Image (cartoon, rainbow, N blue to C red):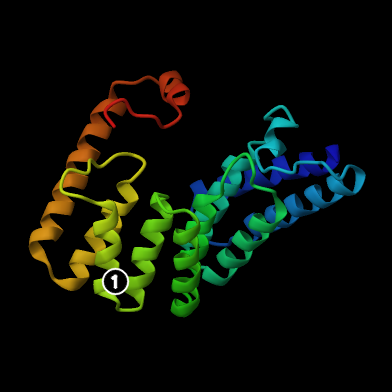
């Protein structure tokens, strides 16, 4: 397995080199993902309890490979390149590979919903998002995904009903729920409600301003320590 990890490290370096050099070919990213699946399969063949949770791939290797960080970047690359069938496939594989008892894959589920909606499967995306939001009422990513799915289906009234369940007059935009405000902005652009569009836009602009001011005042070590928690939320 050490040889596999060395190959993984080499491939991840190549991936990031391709990214900075503007290389359009994503083959190295795909090869690296396939290798990671092999590492997990081989690890579980030797030990059925190997990396039952995604974070354990890093934890059990002393954080030498930044697997989670690379995976996030890989999914982002697929999304950015609009490779939605590949994104759907990768998300489904990750969702079935791990138990997800200690960490929950909200971001992966959100990307899966987006991949479905963006490759001509709006009905499937809507059903997926409806079930997800019922399972996890209160999950901002599930709510945002449902809003986008309803917009795709031209159910703008239904999308607004979801928005109103999550955004009241006094709801504050935070790092946890900014995705819902962003989805609401998209909705009001679609349905032509200029007043609410401006309101959502102003709220998001103010949030981004506060976030930028806060991050500007932090050093690199402080940013890593905070791990995304903002004191003004």
Q: Is residue 213 left or right of residue 12?
A: left
Q: Is residue 34 left or right of residue 136?
A: right
Residue occupying the point 69% across, 52% down = 32
**Above or below for 210 versus 46:** above
**Above or below for 185 versus 66:** below
Dot 1: element: helix
- Residue 167 location in percent, x, y? 24, 51
Residue occupying the point 64% across, 43% down = 101
- Residue 223 location in percent, x, y? 41, 25
The number of callouts visible is: 1
- Residue 139 location in percent, x, y? 42, 50
Q: Is residue 213 left or right of residue 121?
A: left
One can see residue 82 in this view: no
- Residue 162 location in percent, x, y? 30, 62
Q: Which quadrant, please, contains the N terminus?
A: top right
In the rendered image, which residue does mark 1 sit on?
Answer: 158
Residue occupying the point 42% across, 19% down = 222
Q: Is residue 90 left or right of residue 117?
A: right
Q: Which quadrant, please, contains the C terminus?
A: top left
């Amino acid at each position: 397995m050490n040889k596999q990890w060395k190959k993984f490290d080499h491939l991840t370096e190549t991936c990031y080199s391709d990214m900075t050099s503007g290389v359009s070919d994503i083959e190295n990213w795909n090869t690296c993902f396939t290798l990671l699946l092999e590492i997990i399969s081989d690890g579980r063949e030797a030990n059925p309890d190997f990396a039952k949770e995604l974070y354990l791939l890093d934890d059990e290797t002393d954080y030498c490979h930044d697997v989670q960080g690379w995976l996030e970047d890989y999914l982002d690359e697929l999304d950015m390149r609009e490779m939605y069938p590949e994104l759907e496939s990768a998300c489904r594989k990750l969702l079935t590979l791990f138990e997800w008892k200690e960490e929950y894959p909200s971001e992966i589920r959100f990307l899966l919903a987006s991949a479905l909606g963006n490759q001509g499967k709006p009905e499937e995306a809507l059903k997926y998002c409806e079930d997800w939001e019922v399972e996890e009422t209160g999950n901002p990513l599930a709510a945002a995904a449902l809003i986008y799915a309803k917009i795709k289906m031209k159910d703008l009234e239904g999308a607004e009903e979801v928005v109103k369940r999550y955004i009241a007059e006094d709801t504050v935009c935070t790092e946890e729920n900014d995705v819902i405000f962003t989805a609401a902005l998209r909705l009001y652009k679609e349905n032509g409600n200029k007043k609410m569009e401006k309101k959502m836009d102003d709220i998001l602009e103010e949030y981004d301003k506060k976030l930028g001011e806060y991050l500007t005042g932090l050093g690199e070590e402080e940013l890593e320590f905070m791990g995304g928690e903002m004191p003004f939320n």
